[in-house]
Image (cartoon, rainbow, N blue to C red):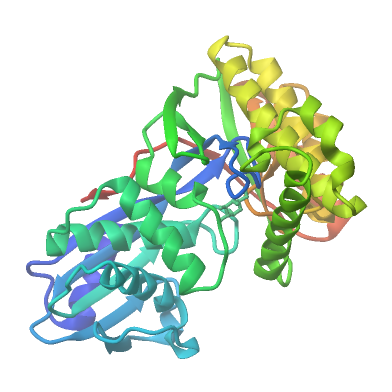
Amino acid sequence: MKEKVLQKFKELYGSAEGVSVYFAPGRVNMIGEHTDYNGGHVFPCALTIGTYMAVKKRADKKLRFYSLNFEDLGVLESSIEGIEPEKSAEWTNYPKGVMWAFAGRGFVMDCGLDVVVSGNIPAGSGLSSSASLEVVTGYMLREQFGFDVSNVDIALIGQYSENNFNGMNCGIMDQFASAMGKKDNAIFLNTADLSYEYAPLVLDGARILIANSNVKHKLVDSKYNERRNECETALRELQEAVAIHTLGDLTEEQFETYKSAIHDETRRKRAKHAVYENQRTIRAVEALKQKDIALFGKLMNDSHISLRDDYEVSCEEIDVLVEEAWKIDGVIGSRITGGGFGGCTVSIVKEEAVNAFIERVGAAYTEKTGKKADFYVVDIGDGPSVL
Ligand code: GLA
């Protein structure tokens, strides 16, 4: 990948001399879904796939961007000054949003940049290609301009830009996982205060298997924002009855005691998911520490059911992938991962069952949906780096 972006850089901009190449990973979340904007816990890990960015400073204020994932768009030009979201800027709204967010915090970028990007995260898969693009941009800006920011700051700036420049009200999980990833570890993050702990994902001869449904249903961002609003309303209703700051403050028992304060059945289900999923995540990490992988897997399965029935962010294709996975011997746990409405499932599968999984789940998926799924056995990688 490094050679590929350097080669393209040379081809487009004349020379690859003095060019730096950066990388930031995508992520997969093991458990703790739709809890990160509810003050709950998440448990994601960085992948070894992600976004590569070749960069060189320019003498003027021009920005030139090229992506090997969107070759037909060619080189997209703009300026480092007066950055604003524009539809015609296409994918460059992500790196430009990060530059805009840095500028908004008083960081000075005194020259433009030539940029070539290439990512190996499957598009629309829900494995955080946009967060990895934001994080690689933040990391690159720090290195190029000497900004005094931590990796956590880079994650927060990435999230801020996605919320305020690109209009997607995401939580902090994706950017945090990309910026703070650690090889062979998942990150147990409390999104209420950003305290975190690394937990080695020791799976006892099992592998992490991602199944990509290759579907992305329409209006994903607006449905995501809608869920978020439902939770915020439910929280306000609960606050009439109990002193809490976030849904993550409640145990299941407390939720059952106070849930009648929520005046709408749908909102009650959304809040229930947020509360129960947070507690499940805490329990799952405890199970992992006790080396109880079977319990970890069961909690993943429960997470899926809750996302399917209470939070309603699954879809027919994803349910087929999960339900077929549950039928296979050697599958420890399987669930939808990421924002939902398509995308991927994550499963923990005993090494010896991996081939059977791919064969059987793949065949059943095509038979039932007429579509083709892709499968990746993944490794857990580190956060961003200079290559
Ligand atoms: C998307 C968002 C995250 C998180 C997940 C759901 O990936 O970007 O912040 O909310 O959905 O867990």
Residue at (57, 33) in percent of width and height: 208
Q: Height in image: 283 above or below 179?
A: above
Q: Position of residue 381 (x, y in %)?
A: 39, 38
Picture quarter with the N terminus: bottom left
The percent position of residue 352, horizontal first and vertical second, equals 64, 22
Q: In the shown orientation, is residue 19 left or right of residue 357?
A: left
Is residue 167 depicted above or below 30 in this figure?
below
Q: Quadrant of residue 67 in the image?
A: bottom left
Of residue 105 and residue 244, the one placed in the foreground of this image is 244
Residue situated in front as seen by the camera: 267 or 220 = 267
Residue 255 in view here? yes
Examine the rendering and report whether any part of residue 322 can be seen: no
| Residue 170, horizontal then vertical, whole percent | 56, 58
Q: Give me the residue at 46% from left, 23% from top.
A: 199
Q: Position of residue 105 (x, y in %)?
A: 28, 66
Residue in view at x 83 percent, y 36 percent: 258
Q: Is residue 103 left or right of residue 179?
A: left
Q: Residue 145 sits in which quadrant?
A: bottom left
Q: Residue furthest top?
A: 290
Q: Nearer the viewer, residue 149 or 70?
A: 149
Q: Is residue 383 rendered to the left or right of residue 224? A: left
- Count the marks: 0
Q: Is residue 108 above or below residue 245?
A: below
